[in-house]
Structures are given as structure tokens and as C-alpha cells.
Amino acid sequence: MTTHERANSTPPLVWVGIALIAIALALLPFAAALVGQAWVRILNFAMIYTMLALGLNIVVGFAGLLDLGYIAFYAVGAYVYALLASPHFDIHLPFWVIIPLGAGLACIFGVLLGAPTLKLRGDYLAIVTLGFGEIIRIFLNNLNAPVNISNGPQGVNLIDPFRIGSFSSARTETLAGITVSGPQKYYYLLLLLTIGVILVNVRLQNSRLGRAWEAIREDEIAARAMGINTRNVKLLAFAMGASFGGIAGAIFSATQQFVSPESFGLFESVIVLAMVVLGGMGNIPGVILGAVMLTLLPEVLRSTMEPLQNALFGRVLLDAETVRLLVFGIALVAIMLFRPAGLWPSAVRKRELEVAKTAGAAE
């Protein structure tokens, strides 16, 4: 069946649903701005984390390689943009030049991580990737002497926003009589990039390479016996996942206009991995759901805990940050207990868990 025939066979209700979703996404930043510009920024972070989670899903969900140092590629992309678009070296390259450079350098770092770890799996691979992530952070933290490259723990500030001519993404402007703030401009740019990353992921999952990753995840020895070049395929997983992290890092750097090594700690790696596991490893809609939930839920809890305590007890008994992390942790544990395959698991993953559960009951 050709693409044209598939398009003609799509039910009209599906197109109506797509149109309604598109309208909702287009109006969402203006609805969020009614509550405050901070919520538009949170939506932007949700899309950045979605790109990170989709990149990590290639490594963890598709290829079955546990990576706890994924945030290092995020840091590489962020610092490439920061150093090439700031007064630090007095270089101000346009963003459409720097983003591919950041993705390419992150891709190279992904290959450098993957090459020595090809024979490692499970806990051993997790330990090595964890060390890699910490090495990058410490390296950036100390790369200010004898030559000041990263500005050390002080970070790099005054980073250029995305600009096209006189149009700046950081300024509030009136376009066709509508006032559009800087975060709202970034929202639409991030939305386009996120849709692009999703489409690439879908194409990869349904490609020959995607099926090779799935074969390696299920049984690497059997995959090798069937003629799959497991070395190259695993390196491609690391490289392609890392490139998405580099793109997300560059956008983070431009939106914040400041980066420091403290933004790329172990906790960030764990959160991104939790997004993939919580949403459903190997399932693109599930990973998107996990990323959006784990970005928005903590902020909702942060803004509601203190008013709720005042309403119930007349005063604040526990700090909002403490309650937020406590509720957040309990929710994660509960979901892992009752939905071990994730909130929206892939059909393959769900079937694997059901088979394992049936085999355990039979024994």
C-alpha cells in the first residue's frame, strides 16, 4: 500500500482528532500564560525533557542498554552552544550552525562511551555510564585552569538567545496584534523540534535498524547468530541517543542564557531514566507521557502543597519542597508496584512481563 493509499484509508475521525490536538497545542502557551509566564517555561522544560527521554529511550528502550550517564550528552550540547554564542570567547555564531555542531559532538561522545563498553551489560554497563556522566560534570567544573574554557563552577552567562535577523526569541513582541512573550516564542520552536524528534524516533523504531535493536535487547547472542553486526548496531544506538541529548542541551542553554556544571548532576540522569521507565520503555507515546508527567507533577505539587496545608491545618507544617519530593517518591513506587511495565507500555514489553509472571506462577 502506498503512502497516498494509506492517507486515503485513514478514518476522518483520526484527522479530526489530529486537528483538535494541533489547535490545543497552538493555544496552550496562551492558556498557560493566564496563570503566569512561569508555567509557559515549565511547558518548555517538559518538551526539553521529552527530547531527552526519547533519546535515552533509543538506548534503554530500543536497544536494552542501561545508561545512567545520559545527562553528559545534554551537558556537551549545552556547553557547545554556550561557548560558541556568548561573550566568554566573544564568539556569536547563529543557532542553526551551533545546534548541528552540538548534536555532532554529543554523537562523537556517544561513540566514545559506547566503544569501550560493547561487551558490558546490566549492572556493569550502568556503573561505567554513571562514571562517564560524573567525569564530564567534574571535567566541566574544573576546566577553568590553566586555560579558562568552561569558566568552572561559575558557569557561562549572557548566552545569546535564538535570533533570526532582528527577531529575538528572548524578547516580548507584538505580532499581528498579539503580544507574544519570549517563553511563548521558545514554546513554538521547541514544539517543532519535539515533533521532529518524535517523527525520527517513529521511523527508527519501524526501520531495519530498529528491529535490530529490538533483537539485541531480547537476545544478543541470537541476534549475532542471525547475522546482525551487534557492535555497529549498539554504537549507533549510543550515537543517535546522544545526538538528541546534544540538541536538547543546546536549546536549554539558549532558553536559560546561563549554564553551569550543577545543572548536569546524577539526579538529572535518574529523572530522565525514570521518565522512560515510568512511561513505558520502548513505547514512544509512553515515554512522552512519562516525560510530561514527571516535569509537570513536581511543579503542581510545589504550587499546591503550601495552600493545601494552610487550608487543612491553618499553617505550613512541612516545607513544600520536602512534601513535593515525598509525594513524588511515593507516586513513583506505587506506579512501579502496580504498573511495572509503565503507564503506557509497548505491546512487546507487556507481553514479556506477562510471560515472565506466568512462568513464575507455574514454578
Image (cartoon, rainbow, N blue to C red):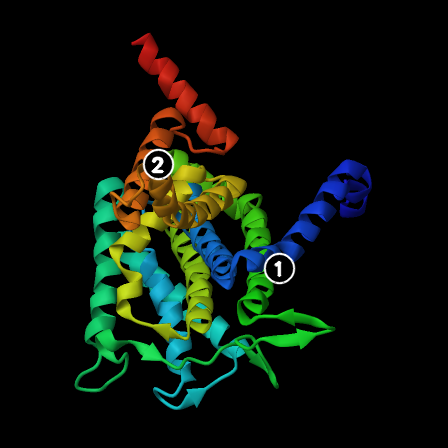
236 versus 341 height, above or below: below
Q: Residue furthest bottom?
A: 90
Q: Name the residue nearer the viewer: 217 or 101.
A: 101
SS state under label 2 = helix
* Mark 2 neighbour density, 10 Å: few (under 14) some (14–19) many (20 or more): few
Looking at the image, residue 138 sits to the left or right of residue 2; the answer is left
Q: Residue at x 33, y 11 (%)?
A: 361
Q: Name the residue nearer the viewer: 296 or 149.
A: 296
Q: Nearer the viewer, mark 2 or mark 1?
A: 2
17 versus 168 height, above or below: above
SS state under label 1 = helix
Residue picked out by circle 1: 30
Q: Position of residue 93 (x, y in %)?
A: 48, 84
Q: Which residue lies furthest to the top in this view?
A: 362
Q: Position of residue 281 (x, y in %)?
A: 43, 39
Q: Which residue is drawn at 38% across and 31% down?
A: 335
Q: Which of marks 2 and 1 is nearer the N terminus?
A: 1
Screen quadrant of the C terminus: top left
